């Protein structure tokens, strides 16, 4: 897997449905244990809530793991609608918890499913979506006269610039998608007429906002 869709950052949102308060929490996570830790933290934060529904999908050690819980709601009315929010957007390495403070009015199975799905969707929107792509960090050393041209060339490309170091030359660092690295390095070679030195790092996964 060289790329996948995930969440940009933790986030939450809420709404009221027939006096019940639904709070959706979501977060990017990397492992099964991170997802469970997030769930437990939300449960601890909302001890007085009637239900804390959750669902998550993670790629842990190469294995795709998905789990959900209705936490006492009628079977299939909570965890599955929340999980479906992740599946329909192809989001992985993410966890959602929807907390319900019961308002005294029953919503019925279909009403519960809609409410939990809505809370999950609101939480995802609060987090934002991003693409995690297999990438590589590339360090270059160039003369000052070329640095501005390189920056302008990369403005609208899928590149993450890192803080440069200025001395006799400019030492600039970029994160490139791994599949595009050779092409992006060729751009630098063309701009500098080959007057550049490269140092490539290890493969990493990097977040590119959509």
Image (cartoon, helix red, strand yellow):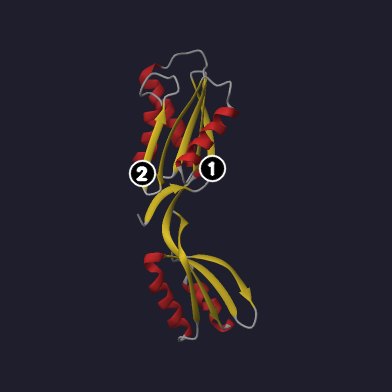
Q: Residues within 10 Å of mark 1 (few under 14, many from 20)?
A: some
Give the number of the disc on residue 64.
Answer: 2
What residue sits 43% from the left and 31% below the top? 118
Q: Residues within 10 Å of mark 2 (few under 14, many from 20)?
A: few
Of residue 25 and residue 110, the one placed in the foreground of this image is 25
- Vertical placement of 106 versus 198: above or below? above
Residue 196 at what x, y percent from top left?
Answer: 50, 82
What residue sits 38% from the left and 25% below the top? 113
- Look at the numbered disc 2 and give the secondary structure of its residue: strand
- Vertical placement of 30 versus 191: above or below? above
Give whichever of discs 1 and 2 has the lower sequence position.
1
User: Taking the image as drawn, is residue 49 in sight?
Assistant: yes
Of residue 105 and residue 60, the one placed in the foreground of this image is 60
What residue sits 47% from the left and 35% below the top? 96
Give the number of the disc on residue 10.
Answer: 1
Residue 107 at what x, y percent from top left?
Answer: 42, 17
């Amino acid at each position: 897997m060289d790329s996948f869709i995930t969440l940009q950052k933790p986030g939450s949102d809420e709404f009221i449905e027939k006096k019940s308060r639904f709070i959706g929490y979501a977060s990017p996570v990397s492992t099964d244990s991170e997802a469970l830790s997030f769930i437990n933290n939300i449960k601890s934060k909302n001890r007085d809530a009637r239900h804390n529904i959750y669902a998550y999908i993670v790629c842990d050690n190469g294995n795709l793991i998905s789990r959900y819980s209705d936490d006492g709601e009628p079977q299939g009315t909570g965890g599955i609608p929340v999980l479906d929010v992740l599946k329909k957007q192809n989001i992985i390495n993410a966890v959602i918890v929807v907390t319900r403070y019961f308002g005294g009015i029953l919503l019925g199975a279909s009403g519960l499913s809609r409410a939990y799905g809505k809370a999950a969707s609101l939480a995802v929107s609060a987090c934002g979506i991003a693409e995690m792509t297999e990438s590589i960090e590339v360090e270059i050393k160039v003369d000052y006269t070329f640095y501005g041209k390189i920056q302008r060339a990369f403005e609208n490309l899928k590149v993450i610039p890192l803080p440069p170091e200025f001395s006799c030359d400019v030492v600039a660092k970029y994160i490139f998608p791994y599949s595009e690295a050779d092409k992006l390095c060729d751009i630098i070679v063309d701009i500098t007429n080959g007057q550049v030195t490269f140092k490539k790092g290890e493969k990493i996964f990097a977040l590119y906002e959509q």
